[in-house]
């Protein structure tokens, strides 16, 4: 077996500040029940031999008492040089799915090790703490073990540090050595595959109308760029060429992305219950599913919460960046998203109202995952419809006191669908398409 480094693995080395590695007193504290029993029996036999004057019994008592002490001294003076590595497969896993953790232990010393027990520190939500017993590891030898972890809850969970427990062949003493490094497992929301339906209101295109309108206005309105090898000579803009002293060509018409904002209501007061099957977790999973579905279809997507802070994007707008990069950032952010103390959705409305135009994009879809709405918040959500060509709302929680705010939203132009735990988002997505009977123009 190769002794080279493992790609993607993080090496761990023992913590030099570990209190168990420093003092003999700490090593004496590692006596097992068997070792303490032998020590007590030996001392009792020695006392009895002194009282009764039995020299043979004294020898037996000294032998019983010295055996655990010798084991403690040997383990205390033993200095194994071992290194460990941990590898997560994968490092980012959806909730309720398993990830595998691979551990590797290398004995880099010139002497074989004794019986070793590995124990990795794992949060209780990921499962029981894994323990492994390794017999004898030869010099320059290696042992590899693995275990599985699973969580129903989103979040970032530390794995480690790894603990190494040394023991003697007689089981008299056990000493623990801790490694210093740890890894992080990210549990992201579950993402459901949505059917490729066509939704209206997301009109977009290749931006040629705006460029053509500029061209019809006259040569002064054309925005040129520098000549590049391979450009058509018929596109050279001679007036700009004379002005700049170098060849300039008319800028190519750039494709225009359809813009979509996904609004996620995270107000603590808007949701009841907790846990993986709560309405809030359903809304988080739904928002993640919609965002990734639209990113795969070429939309410019941002995720906006009631706090008014876009969850993705490189410049604060939430619309820029590569789709794969935005998807990774989005899932990573949703993994640790918590409910907010905001009383309402006014901050999100301020962002939508003052968003303005973003070059290369146009207003398209607004998809909202909402909790319970009172009359005031329902009116605010109704005004959000003015900032978009098409608005869809998925309600994960009924209104306070069972109040139904869907009619008010529908009257304002929203397409409202009731969701929540027990309903599947792909079915609701298809239901919205069938209810409208309209197509998505891309």
Image (cartoon, rainbow, N blue to C red):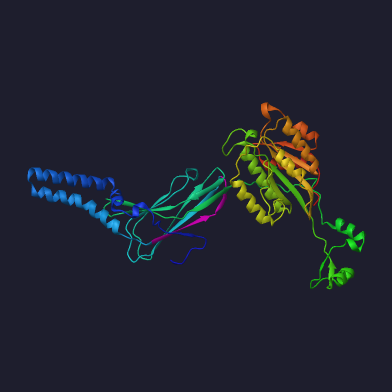
From the top left corner, tell me how far across and down residue 268 is, in percent.
Answer: 62, 35
**Residue 144 or residue 179, whichever sits in front:** 179
Q: Residue at x 46, y 47 (%)?
A: 122
Residue found farthest to the top: 401
Q: Is residue 235 left or right of residue 392?
A: right
Magenta stretch: includes residue 207: no
Q: Tell me where the magenta segment starts and ends, as one range.
A: 82-95
**Count of marks, rendered view:** 0
Residue 261: image location, x then y, percent = 73, 46
Position of residue 389 measured from the top left corner of the image (x, y, whole percent): 81, 44
Q: Is residue 274 left or right of residue 120?
A: right
- Main structural element of the magenta stretch: helix, strand or loop? strand
**Looking at the image, residue 309 lies above or below residue 166:** above
In front here: 90 or 429?
90
- x then y, percent, for residue 360: 78, 55
Quarter holding the N terminus? bottom left
The correct choice, above or below, for 439 with respect to 345 in the image is: below
Q: Is 196 or 305 nearer to us in this picture?
A: 305
What is the quadrant of residue 386 in the picture? top right
* Residue, far left: 53
Q: Is residue 427 above or below residue 297?
A: above
Q: Is residue 85 magenta?
A: yes
Q: Nearer the viewer, residue 277 or 389?
A: 389
* Residue 79 appears left or right of 320: left
């Amino acid at each position: 077996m190769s002794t080279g480094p493992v790609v993607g693995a993080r090496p761990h080395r023992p913590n030099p500040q570990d209190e168990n590695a420093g003092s003999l007193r700490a090593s004496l504290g590692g006596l097992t029940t068997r070792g303490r029993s032998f020590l007590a029996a030996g001392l009792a036999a020695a006392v009895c031999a002194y009282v009764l004057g039995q020299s043979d019994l004294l020898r037996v008592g000294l032998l019983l008492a010295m055996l655990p002490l010798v084991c403690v001294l040997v383990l205390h003076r033993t200095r194994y040089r071992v290194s460990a590595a941990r590898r997560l497969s994968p490092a980012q896993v959806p909730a309720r799915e398993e990830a595998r953790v691979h551990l590797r232990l290398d004995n880099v010393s010139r002497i074989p090790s004794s019986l070793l027990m590995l124990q990795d520190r794992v949060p209780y939500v990921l499962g029981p703490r894994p323990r492994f017993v390794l017999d004898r590891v030869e010099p320059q030898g290696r042992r590899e073990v693995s275990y599985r972890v699973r969580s129903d809850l989103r979040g970032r969970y530390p794995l480690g540090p790894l603990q190494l427990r040394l023991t003697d062949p007689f089981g008299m003493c056990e000493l623990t050595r801790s490694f210093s490094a740890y890894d992080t497992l990210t549990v992201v929301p579950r993402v459901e595959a949505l059917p490729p339906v066509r939704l209206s209101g997301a009109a977009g295109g290749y931006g040629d109308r705006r460029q053509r309108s500029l061209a019809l206005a006259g040569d002064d309105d054309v925005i040129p760029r520098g000549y590049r090898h391979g450009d058509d000579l018929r596109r050279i803009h001679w007036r700009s060429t004379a002005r700049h002293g170098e060849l300039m060509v008319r800028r190519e018409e750039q494709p225009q992305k359809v813009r979509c904002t996904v609004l996620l209501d995270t107000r603590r007061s808007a949701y009841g219950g907790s846990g993986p099957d709560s309405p809030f977790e359903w809304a988080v999973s739904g928002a993640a599913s919609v965002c990734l579905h639209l990113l795969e279809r070429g939309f410019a997507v941002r995720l906006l919460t009631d706090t008014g802070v876009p969850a993705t994007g490189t410049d604060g707008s939430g619309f820029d960046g590569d789709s794969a990069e935005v998807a990774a950032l989005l899932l990573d952010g949703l993994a640790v998203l918590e409910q907010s103390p905001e009383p309402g959705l006014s901050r999100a409305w301020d962002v939508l109202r003052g968003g303005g135009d973003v070059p290369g994009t146009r207003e398209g879809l607004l998809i909202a995952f909402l909790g319970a709405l009172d009359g005031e918040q329902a009116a605010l959500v109704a005004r959000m419809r003015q900032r978009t060509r098409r608005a869809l709302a998925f309600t994960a929680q009924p209104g306070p006191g069972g109040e139904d705010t869907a009619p008010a939203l529908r009257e304002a132009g929203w397409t409202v669908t009731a969701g929540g735990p027990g309903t599947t988002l792909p079915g609701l997505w298809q239901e919205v398409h069938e209810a409208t009977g309209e197509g998505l123009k891309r």
